[in-house]
């Protein structure tokens, strides 16, 4: 699994020297899987392919889950520059907005990409579960 994750991470890297270094480490880790030590008799090719597919799937899941967090951390870093102290309520609200409301160009939210299913509509949820604010009290005008 680490070899497949490093392969995915190398694709996103811009520095060519670092990219080749990461790909080399990935190849070193994946070379352990190759049947050169006589274990091919014990484990069938079908089983090896199945395990490799599961490892790729796990590496992609880890990459997706960490990219959501990285995106949220970037949002919080931008907001932190101007405020320097975010309350717990503000952090929770920012997390909800990032995960369920903000969409990419392809129209998906972070929660939708992570859970691989479309979540319920945030606006509808708020309308059904939040009370409307009370009407403001009339101010008495003082007569001089």
Image (cartoon, helix red, strand yellow):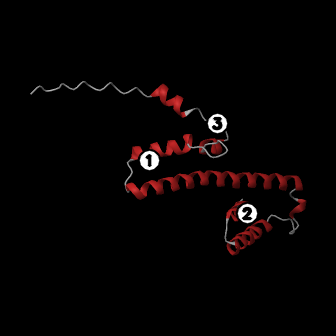
Q: CA distance from mark 1 to mark 3?
A: 23 Å
Point out residue 14 in the picture as x, y percentages from the top left corner. 67, 68
Regarding residue 44, the answer to whether it shows in the image is no
Say which element carries label 1.
Answer: helix
Quadrant for the N terminus, please.
bottom right
Q: Considering only order in the chain, which callout, 2 or 1, is on the residue closer to the N terminus?
A: 2
Q: Residue furthest right?
A: 41
Image marks 1 and 2: residues in contact by CB distance under 8 Å: no
Measure the alpha-carbon separation of dots 1 and 2.
Answer: 33 Å
Q: Which residue is mark 1?
A: 91
Which class describes the residues within 10 Å of circle 2: few (<14), some (14-19), or many (20+)? many
How far separated are the C-alphas under marks 3 and 2?
A: 29 Å
The answer to which of 81 and 18 lies nearer the viewer is 81
Task: Evaluate if marks 3 and 2 touch, with contact meaning CB atoms under 8 Å apart.
Answer: no
The residue under the point 75% across, 55% down is 56
Q: Earlier in the sequence, mark 3 or mark 2?
A: 2
Residue occupied by mark 2: 7
Left or right: 20 as drawn, with respect to 39: left
Residue drawn at 73 percent across, 51 percent down:
57
Rendered location of residue 28, percent (x, y):
76, 71
Q: For residue 34, which numbered disc appears in the image?
A: none
Of badges 1 and 2, nearer the viewer stands 1
Residue under circle 3? 118
Where on the picture, by quarter, is residue 7? bottom right
């Amino acid at each position: 699994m680490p070899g497949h994750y490093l392969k995915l991470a190398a694709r996103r890297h811009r520095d060519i020297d670092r990219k080749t270094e990461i790909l080399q480490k990935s190849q070193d880790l994946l070379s352990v899987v190759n049947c050169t030590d006589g274990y091919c008799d014990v484990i069938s090719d079908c089983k090896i392919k199945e395990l490799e597919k599961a490892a790729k799937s796990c590496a992609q899941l880890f990459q997706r889950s960490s990219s959501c967090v990285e995106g949220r951390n970037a949002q919080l870093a931008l907001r932190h520059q101007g405020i320097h102290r975010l309350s717990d309520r503000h952090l929770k609200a920012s997390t909800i907005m990032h995960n369920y409301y903000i969409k990419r160009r392809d129209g998906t939210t972070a929660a939708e990409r992570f859970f691989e299913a479309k979540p319920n509509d945030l606006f509808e949820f708020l309308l059904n579960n939040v009370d409307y604010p009370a009407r403001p009290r009339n101010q008495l005008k003082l007569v001089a």
